[in-house]
Amino acid sequence: MVFESFREAVRLLRQMTVLWIPGGVGGLLLALIWLLYHFTGAFFTGRLIILFGLLLLVFIVGMLVVLRERQGDLRALISGGIRYYFRVLLPFLVIIFTIAVAFMLLIVTLGFAGITPDPQTLSIIFLCVIIPVLMLTYFFDLAAVVEDQKVFAAVQRSASLVSANVMEVVGFFIMTALAGFAVIFGLMMVWEIALINQLEPLMNYTETQMAALTPGDLLALIGPEGIWVTAAVLFVGGLILIPLLFTYKACYYQKLAGHTSPEQKITGEYDSKGRWYKY
């Protein structure tokens, strides 16, 4: 199912050009964030990241709607994204809140035990909290869009699917990581080849100099040309990764959910003549 879903995702990306629109939007926003960070600094850029993320969510949710129907154009993508926007955003906020509360409870528990965790320990605790939560709730957006589940039902549906198919889902995550790594590695190679002249001095750096190299030093080394090349690579990365990973996720979820369909609870009662009336 893991490989079959990936092949189906690639086939859909070839057939439905509308699926590339969220990637184009995401790539443009990534490149813009990078340029704004370089030219205006982190203070202004940090505030725009949230705004850009909320804007990108419209296109991603719309893409999930188009994938559910297996058809649609730009108008269907945007209208679907607006219609299901809060159906996806609200569970996401619930998940973030849950992670924050769980993390704080662990810190408080350690405090009562007389343990003051250092930054390294805090990082480990945070990973121990966030990884299981994200794995269990990874499909909440598709539960909300594909199955039209509400806020808490979408989170519960994702958790139940993952819990019932742990090994299958682990295989999906491995495939997702491999696909993402392949794209990122390829783009890194393109970036290094495009800036080989600017990066050539690094070949003569000692281990001490490489360890002392800061992001500011690297930016000064690649120069203005490197800034624009990096923006172009970020655009291509968003253009490829967003459609590929979300289409694969949708295809896999539809196959996974097909094996464990949610129970349909029908409420009602029989009258005195034995006739059933559904509420």
Image: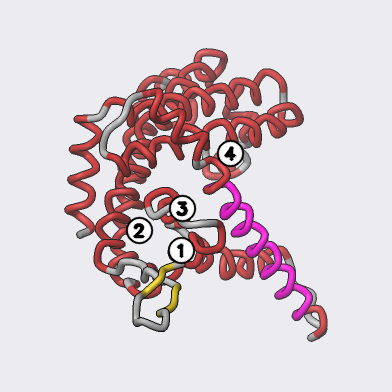
Relative vertical location of residue 274 with respect to residue 34 in this rendering, above or below = below
Q: Residues within 10 Å of mark 1 (few under 14, many from 20)?
A: some
Residue for badge 1 = 135
Badge 4 marks a residue whose secondary structure is helix
x then y, percent, for residue 184: 38, 38
Q: Amino acid at mark 1?
A: Met
Q: Which residue is mark 2?
A: 173
Q: Amino acid at mark 3?
A: Ala
- State which tag comes first along the sequence, 4 or 2: 2
Determine whether, in the image, residue 117 is placed left or right of residue 143. Answer: right
Q: Quick one: label 1 or label 4, which is nearer the N terminus? A: 1
Q: Which residue is mark 4?
A: 209
Query: How many residues crowd mark 3 within 10 Å: few (<14), some (14–19), many (20+)?
Result: many
Please give the range of residues in magenta: 88-110
At label 2, the amino acid type is Phe
State left or right for residue 179 relative to residue 99: left
**Residue at disc 1, secondary structure:** helix
Residue 140's place in the image compared with 81, above or below, is: below
* Vertical comparison of 43 with 86: above or below: above
Q: CA distance from mark 4 to mark 3?
A: 50 Å
| Label number found at residue 183 | none
Q: Earlier in the sequence, mark 3 or mark 1?
A: 1
* Magenta region includes residue 100: yes
Give the residue type at disc 4: Gln
- CA distance for labels 4 and 2: 37 Å
Return the residue nearer the eye: 141 or 105. Answer: 141
Image-based side of 210 in relation to 97, left or right? left
Q: Residues within 10 Å of mark 2 (few under 14, many from 20)?
A: some
CB under 8 Å between callouts 3 and 2?
no
Residue at 52% x, 28% y: name it: 30
Query: Of callouts 4 and 3, which one flags the residue occurring earlier in the amino acid sequence?
Result: 3
